[in-house]
Amino acid sequence: MKPRHTMTLTIRQTIGIIAVACILAVFTNLLRQDSIPFADDWSADSRFSDASGQSMVVGLTEASRMYAKGTAVFVDARPEEQYEQGHIKGAVSLPWQQVHERFMEAADHLETAETLICYCDGENCELSHDLALFLNEMGFEGARVLVNGWTVWQEAGLPTQNRDSDNEQIDSETN
Amino acid sequence: MGAVFLYASYDKILNPQAFAEAVYNYQILPDFAVNAVALALPWIEMVAGLCLITGIWQPGAALVCALLMCVFTAALVFNQIRGLDVHCGCFSTEAVHGPAGIWTVIRDLFFLVLSAYLLVRTVFLPLKKTGI
């Protein structure tokens, strides 16, 4: 067999395998019950939705308005260490990794809020969404997600605090 | 190698939505292509794996495997490098910093070498035999 012929054959087989696989993929996806659309909407509104498909996303303007009115409690889904380095002022820490251990402790602070706004950091961070779904399940209905919350909040120059400013606050309270 | 691909494809075929999310999280493909790739990729793995095991179209299957391993390893390494610049509390990016990320790359490199060897054996070695 000539080398060129072998290469042509190999490439033909490769295309054949891919074609067979694609046909199988299309047909199984059409036939199965839990099929997914061939092209999906991966925007934040669609990704961060609740069980009924309703978007849980809250915009920064609306979130900051609720913050100013004091009707919303912000819930930080990031690890404790990142929360201590800096967070939205007054936010409650409920790291997704320890959500079951920390839930009861955090729940006391959440009960008074009209709206819960979960946030983490990064456009694709799923922690806030996972946490909002969990809070919904635990009876805190209407929990929302502020996408890329920590970054957009800081960029807008809205109030933040960290471990040091927490201490300052405690000092001024005790004085 | 065929078994590895079959094993890898099995769970992805059963859970298309979960796999689509995994593909999306790599942040490499444009949004519209995510689902199409998530649907086709596991089947390509499955068919290539079956071809390797049964011996039908073996050279083609070896080439598919080598190409797939190149793509997978490149995607992993790309995100490993990029992951360092992402300040995000996601599990995925945290894992990138840890040994799990590095071991995944090493594992993929091992499979890449294996599939390259397979490609050489199936495509080029038979030539030598006919040459003798």
Image: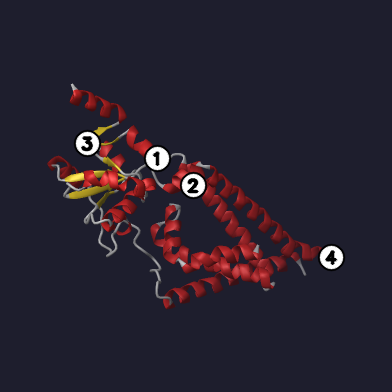
Real-space CA distance between mark 2 and mark 3, rounded to the nearest whole angstrom:
31 Å
The answer to which of A173 and B53 lies nearer the viewer is: A173
* Mark 4 residue type: Gly
Q: Residue furthest left?
A: A69
Could you say where residue B13 lies in the image, as x and y percent from the top left? Answer: 49, 68
Q: Are marks 4 and 1 in contact (CB under 8 Å)?
A: no
Query: What residue is drawn where x is 39% and y is 43%?
Result: B88
* Mark 2 residue type: Asn
Lower position in the chain sequence, tag 4 or tag 2: 2
- Relative to B88, residue A168 above or below: above
Residue position marked by numbered label 2 in the rendering:
B79
Lower position in the chain sequence, tag 1 or tag 2: 2
Which element is circle 3 on? loop
- Relative to B108, residue A54 above or below: below
Real-space CA distance between mark 4 and mark 2, rounded to the nearest whole angstrom:
44 Å
Q: Do the residues labelled 2 and 3 touch (CB within 8 Å)?
A: no
The answer to which of A114 and B70 lies nearer the viewer is: A114
What is the chain identity of the residue bearing mark 2?
B
Assess disc 2: are there few (<14), some (14-19) or many (≥20) residues with their C-alpha within 10 Å of its C-alpha. Answer: many
Dot 4 and dot 1 within a common chain: yes
Lower position in the chain sequence, tag 4 or tag 1: 1
Please indicate, yes or no, whether residue A114 appears anywhere in the rendered image.
yes
Assess disc 4: are there few (<14), some (14-19) or many (≥20) residues with their C-alpha within 10 Å of its C-alpha. Answer: few
Assess disc 1: are there few (<14), some (14-19) or many (≥20) residues with their C-alpha within 10 Å of its C-alpha. Answer: few
Dot 1 and dot 3 within a common chain: no
Which element is circle 4 on? helix
* Mark 1 residue type: His
